[in-house]
Amino acid sequence: MGTLAAAQPLLIALILAWSGYGKLTSPDQADRTALPRLLGESGTARPGWFGASRAVAAYRGVAVLEIVIALLLLRSWAIGAVAAVALSVGFTGFLVYSKIVVPEASCGCAGKSAKPVGNRAIGRALLLLATAGLAATASTAWWSAGVGLLVLVVEAAAFAMLSAELDRYWLLPLRRLRIRLGHPYAGTASDDTPLVATQRRVLLSPAYRAVDGLLRSDIHDYWDDEDWRYVSYAAKYDGRRATAVFAVPHQNSTPSAIRVAVVDEEGLTLYRPTVLATAG
Amino acid sequence: MAGITAEASWFCCGNAWGPCGSAGHGACGTCNSGSMQHAWPNTSDACYAITRPDSCGITGMSRRTCGFRHATTSPCTGKRIVTSIADCGPQTDLFCGERSCCGGNCASNRVIDFTPAAFSALGLSLSSGLSPVSIDVA
Amino acid sequence: MTTTMDRRSLLSRAALGATGLVAATAMGSLAPEAAFAAQTPDAGQPDPNFAEGVITGRNQDLLQVQGSDGRLHRIQLTGVTSVWKLRPTTIDQARIGDGLYARGVLLPDGILAAEAIWVNIVNLTVAITAIGRNGVQFDHHGQKVVGHVQSGTTAAVYNGTPAVSDLSMLTVGRHAQVIGAWRPGTNEIDIATIYTSN
């Protein structure tokens, strides 16, 4: 236990240095956290778009404090450990405040991450608190911890798994690999044409250009019949209510193959452009 | 400024329903889905740093601030609307080279996002979501 | 249902040119501006011919909608109103608790006669963070959104090529734009179209 406690200051120092460096290199991240709200700067602006100076200053201040405590832990580990306990109590409190008061705010813990404060971020702060607490009980310096240092590898892995900022280095590649081995949607390909593909073909057609000024709605109805898919829109023709119906061939993909007619409520065909092939 | 042709989409704002609940009133604090407004990728340095139209090769994207008016015409429908800037966006750099067409008109690169009110006022379908437009100063 | 089938069959024949024209084609009558000469709203102002909000009441085909900007709307649906709810559907699908966008014509009595409504529609710029049998997990500005795949409806557009039903090229870590239908009261959507790269 003694060597384990003694080893902790090294890990805490590395984590604080990483986190402080992240904050110093992306000070704009302060606007996405709950700091502006905590410091009474909260506006209606979307976090991150415009600067909020007091929050940025406080954010930078915390970063400097983290680096100072990290250096202290490496040299005067006993004082450093007490300071780290105080800092992690502050972090945990801030994250809990953040989750309750500004749920959409991100943690800002180690620089760029838009993720709102979640259980992982709070868990990480608690783990840091526990580590700092353990370090405060150490009776020897970390450089004489010996095998205790090996345990740090396991602890560092636990920190990494709780860090959303590091997901892209291990979690996303792992998920990509799993999908490469068997994609959950491997069987979704089919010969059916999605409606959005038909809609796009209609928009590209001379037929659409011939009637676009008459259309009053989005797609009203659609159906398939043998070689064609039909798509209808509500339309107005000469002040009369009507329907514009497009016939889109399944096989022929040339835009000019698409036909259109405008039909009134009684079923009379009011308009059918006939020179589409040359209009295209 | 000569008009530019670009790809347009739509976004919601104003603490409305669904995933829009946390969207807020945009960078300008005025954005509402039901108003005639749009987002522009260069409203401030901080905004430009996020949208990065230069990474798609678009240089000289004018700095326009909240309330600035643009007139937009849809080559699909021939309709023209005037809208004002209410937010920073879209994230142009995520969609470099993406193209949408309407009739014989095509456009690449997302440089404008409209509120649902404005997008549908152009006669465009919210369900198709993307369309070429030509943008000018109102 | 029979009338729908009859109407569809009539429209099919008209589109294919199997019906006679009653009016000669007169391009002069097609001026699109004439139909939309209605006043255009001022930039930055609410559009009176548009409504956004949550459906709080429904009396037959008249919807009561509470707008997020504080406006209250009464929206009349008719047989010619186009209704989108994941796909083009019928007017009975607009339910209390649904979110909606509506475009139409504001009548003098304050009722919006809807020409098109889009129910629960969302358009999200996201990153794909996980793909599983139960759905695709997205990161939407830091918030988690779960997208469900609906067989026969969900389509993917890869690198701007025509939409296909094949979703096997979706990749974790990629950015995507998703048009979908929100499931009220949840952070879940049904995916209509996902635009991404592969």
Image: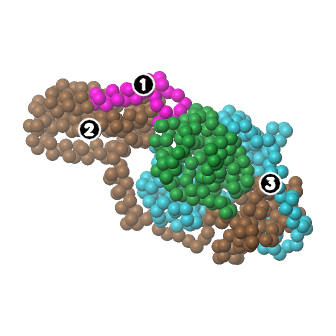
Q: Colour of chain A?
A: brown
Left or right of residue C112, residue B40 in this image: left
Residue A269, labelled with which disc? none
Q: Which chain is green?
A: B
**Which residue is the site of mark 3?**
C32
Chain containing mark 3? C
Q: Which amino acid type is shown beneath numbered disc 3?
A: Pro
Identify the colour of chain C in the image. Answer: cyan
Q: Callout 2 environment at 10 Å: few (<14), some (14 to 19), or many (20+)?
A: some
Place residue C2 in its image quadrant. bottom right
Secondary-structure class at tag 2 = helix
Badge 1 sits on which subunit?
A: A
Say if residue A148 shows up in the picture. yes
**Residue A147 appears at what percent x and percent y?**
11, 44
Q: CA distance from mark 3 to mark 1?
A: 54 Å
- Which mark is on residue A54? 1
**Residue type, mark 2 in image:** Ile
- Give the magenta-colored segment's residue range: A37-66
The residue that label 2 is drawn on is A15
Label 2 lies in what chain?
A: A
